[in-house]
Image (tube, rainbow, N blue to C red):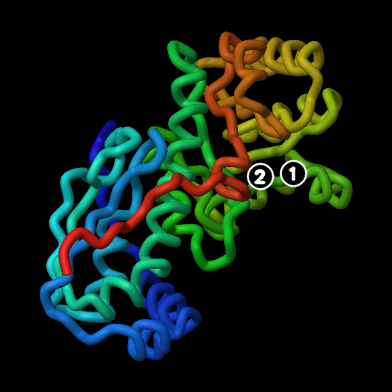
């Protein structure tokens, strides 16, 4: 799996909020029952197979508590890890390790969970023309991190926010009287911005074609209607107009076999970011 690095606009804020939420600097258990040995060591061990994501974020959590701590990693984001792998080693005060442990684990386990489930969908779609994309179904304020994890898992990012591209959904369509005219006016106002039209009904597909949408989403359509819609789009495609096709709507991994050979470009999956299982890991003290 590729190594991927990215800067995040709000990471320091998220870490600060998380540390305050945990009252890491007021850990009464550690303060009362332990001293402050500067020679404590710990190892982060994988308890399940998966794709790693969040190593640098894990480090930043500890460094925010104690800049003098030392962390050495055996793996990078985007790499496969197996049960029992020693992901990284920490050398720091015992108070730092014990107080920052859960906050750091929450980040790396959640992000690795996203990367892992994404990778499982990517592998299930092997040899298909289509690519796996995420959605905006993310924990508020954590979108950059979640979408980064999707990329670490081998997936691709859909729009980051509402300003990045136009997606005309079913509710929009119910209020728009003349879609081709409105899309034409939109392009004059926002040249170069991608326009996608979401189609839940077969009749809406022709509207999207007439509007010359850059991307046509077939959302929650049955397989027969999906095939018919794809045929209609491809028959109306020309050298100058060849829209991408996206499938969306409750698509499960075990259902990919039915659609992986269809002539589509994207399959967007909400579950990648809205309800992934955290990848199990354990931080264990080795020497104190």
Q: Position of residue 142 (x, y in %)?
A: 49, 62
Q: Is residue 187 visible?
A: no
Q: Are the two marked residues, 1 and 2, in contact with CB atoms closer than 8 angstroms?
A: yes
* Residue at 41% in and 69% down: 103
The relative height of residue 6 versus residue 141 in the rendered view (above or below) is above
Along the line of sight, the residue nearer the viewer: 258 or 60? 60
Q: Which residue is mark 1?
A: 181
Which quarter of the picture shows residue 237?
top right
Along the line of sight, the residue nearer the viewer: 123 or 222? 123
Q: Position of residue 35 (x, y in %)?
A: 23, 86
* Residue at 23% in and 45% down: 86
Q: Quadrant of the C terminus?
A: bottom left
* In the image: residue 44, left or right of residue 271: left
* Residue at 74% in and 39% down: 180
Q: Which residue is mark 2?
A: 184
Q: Is residue 20 visible?
A: yes
Q: Position of residue 59 (x, y in %)?
A: 25, 64
* In the image: residue 59, left or right of residue 255: left
């Amino acid at each position: 799996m590729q190594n991927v690095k990215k800067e995040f606009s709000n990471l320091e804020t998220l870490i600060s909020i998380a540390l305050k939420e945990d009252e890491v600097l007021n850990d009464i258990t550690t303060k009362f029952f332990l001293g402050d040995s500067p020679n404590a060591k710990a190892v982060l061990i994988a308890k399940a197979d998966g794709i790693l994501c969040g190593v640098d974020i894990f480090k930043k959590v500890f460094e925010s508590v104690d800049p003098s701590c030392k962390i050495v990693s055996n793996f990078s984001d985007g790499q496969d890890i197996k049960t029992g792998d020693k992901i990284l080693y920490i050398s720091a005060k015992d108070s730092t390790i014990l107080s920052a442990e859960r906050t750091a684990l929450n980040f790396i386990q959640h992000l690795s969970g996203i990367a892992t489930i994404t990778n499982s969908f990517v592998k299930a779609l092997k040899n298909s023309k289509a690519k796996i994309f995420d959605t905006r179904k993310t924990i508020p304020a954590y979108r950059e991190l979640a979408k980064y994890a999707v990329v670490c898992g081998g997936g691709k990012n859909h729009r980051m926010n509402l300003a990045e591209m136009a997606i005309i959904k079913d509710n929009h369509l119910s209020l728009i009287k003349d879609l081709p005219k409105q899309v034409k006016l939109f392009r004059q106002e926002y040249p170069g911005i991608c326009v996608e039209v979401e189609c839940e009904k077969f009749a809406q597909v022709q509207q999207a074609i007439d509007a010359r949408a850059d991307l046509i989403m077939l959302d929650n359509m049955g397989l027969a209607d999906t095939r018919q819609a794809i045929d209609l789009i491809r028959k109306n495609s020309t050298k100058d107009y060849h829209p991408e096709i996206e499938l969306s709507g409750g698509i499960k991994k075990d259902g990919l076999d039915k659609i992986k050979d269809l002539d589509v470009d994207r399959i967007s999956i909400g579950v990648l970011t809205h309800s992934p299982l955290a990848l199990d890991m354990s931080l264990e003290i080795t020497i104190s």
